[in-house]
Amino acid sequence: MAEYRKKLIEVALPLKEINEQSAREKSIRHGHPSTLHLWWARRPLAACRAVLFAQLVDDPSSDPAYRRPDGSVDEERAGNKRAELFNLIEELVRWENSNNPRVISKARAEIARCVASRKIERGELKKETIIYGPHTPGHGTQASRLQNAGRVPALHEEHPDGPLPNDGRYTAWQVACRLAPAKVVNHFLANYAPPVLDPFAGGGSIPLEAQRLGLRAHASDLNPVPVLINKALIEIPPRFAGLPPVNPARKADLWSTLSGQNAHAWNADVSPAKEKNCGQDSRGPYNGAQGLAEDVRYYGQWMRDEAEKRIGHLYPKVKITQEMVDDGRPDLEPYLGRELTVIAWLWARTVASPDPSVGGKHVPLVRSFWLSKKKGKEAYVQPVVNREKGTYEFKVRVGKPKDGFDPGKG
């Protein structure tokens, strides 16, 4: 029976760097999955990435590659390798390296090395087993290409490895010795590495990072909100990996590129024969989920424009006047004369006023008029009542409340 191998997570981790990068994620907005939809208990991507990696990589003290001929651990070599793995984790958890091909490929290669070595040791694979080559199932097909390109949004791309040596075959032993290129490593992980199952996936951090490391990921949840988050985050993007966008603007651009004719004069769909060339047009090849992202941006803008046409009149823009600036809003002076889009509207129920002097006019039920209580950036809404005309209006004020007005009392 093969001896149990301790994983890196059972021995040690560079916790300081992992914690720092996990805390840093809270301030990252652009491109972070948390902006897709709020989920309360979302786990930091950096921590999930580090934990998954450390769970699959052997600690050098248990790795046969770092033992002497007599079976004892070569402490010096094992220590050096552990330091190398720590350095890799410290690189891996940085947000800037989330889609860094060099770092991701290196992490995948380490995982594949440990998995292949263990399977060979236990007899699940033979050293000469062909892992990747002309006769492996699905080799060269589009399905195989998409499967092995990596399973994470913005990372679904094949890493260019150049021509494969000899007849293009790679064995399990070559994977275990880190002699296989990234394409072969991706194929190995997708078919031989253990899958990752998260039955309560929530915000999807664990399955997302499993995909980033080239693993098969399965996610589920009891709540329909995280189910939708995970479907949009980890299920749909891989289906369109490496494919071009299909929106009309892009098709017109493609037609203009292929035929040299006026792009605006062509409204028909691109034929299947021409669609084969859609991976590259005047804007170059589409890698990963770039094509899908372009379609999302196009149709998102279309929906925004349609909403503007249909209900835009219900949400008018505000023209900044000198009167507004003089009326306690000096912060608006740089925008004098411009029309600004209102970015937030306050909603409230209304009831007939119990004050007999206003003739039953409807007034809003508001618990608080505060917009911001942050020190130095206070802002609130103040109702201004004109009893002579029997009317009222609301004005946004900045700074600390004046004239005894308490925004906390609705």
Image (spheres, grey):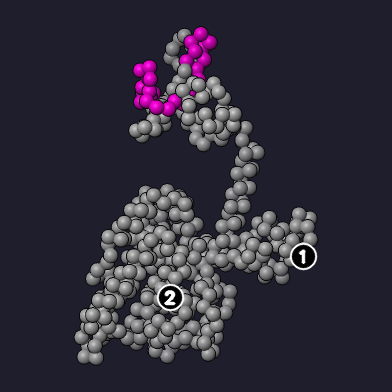
Labels in figure, total:
2
**Residue carrying label 1:** 259
Secondary structure of the residue carrying numbered label 2: helix
x and y, in percent, of residue 237 in the image: 52, 62
Looking at the image, residue 299 sits to the left or right of residue 112; the answer is right
Tell me the residue at 51%/29% (across/down). Answer: 332
Task: Name the foreground residue: 38 vs 350.
Answer: 38
Magenta-drawn stretch contains 389: yes
Q: Which numbered disc covers residue 399?
A: none
The answer to which image quadrant residue 313 occupies is top right
Looking at the image, residue 261 sits to the left or right of residue 6; the answer is right
Task: Name the foreground residue: 34 vs 15.
Answer: 15
The answer to which image quadrant residue 311 occupies is top right
Whether 352 is drawn above or below 257: the answer is above
Q: Is residue 279 visible?
A: yes
Q: Which numbered disc covers residue 189?
A: 2
Whether 174 is drawn above or below 403: the answer is below
Q: Is residue 4 visible?
A: no
Whether 224 is drawn above or below 130: the answer is above
| Quadrant showing the N terminus | bottom left
Residues in magenta? 385-410
Please name the amino acid that badge 1 sits on: Ser
Tell me the residue at 57%/79% (across/down). Answer: 140
Label 2: how many Cα within 10 Å (few below 14, some 14–19, many 20+): many
Magenta stretch: dominant secondary structure? loop
Magenta-drawn stretch contains 214: no
Secondary structure of the residue carrying numbered label 1: helix
Tell me the residue at 42%/27% (across/down). Answer: 398
Give the CA separation, mark 1 to mark 2. 42 Å
Looking at the image, residue 183 sits to the left or right of residue 369; the answer is right
Q: Find the residue positioned furthest to the front.
A: 334
Whether 92 is drawn above or below 139: the answer is above
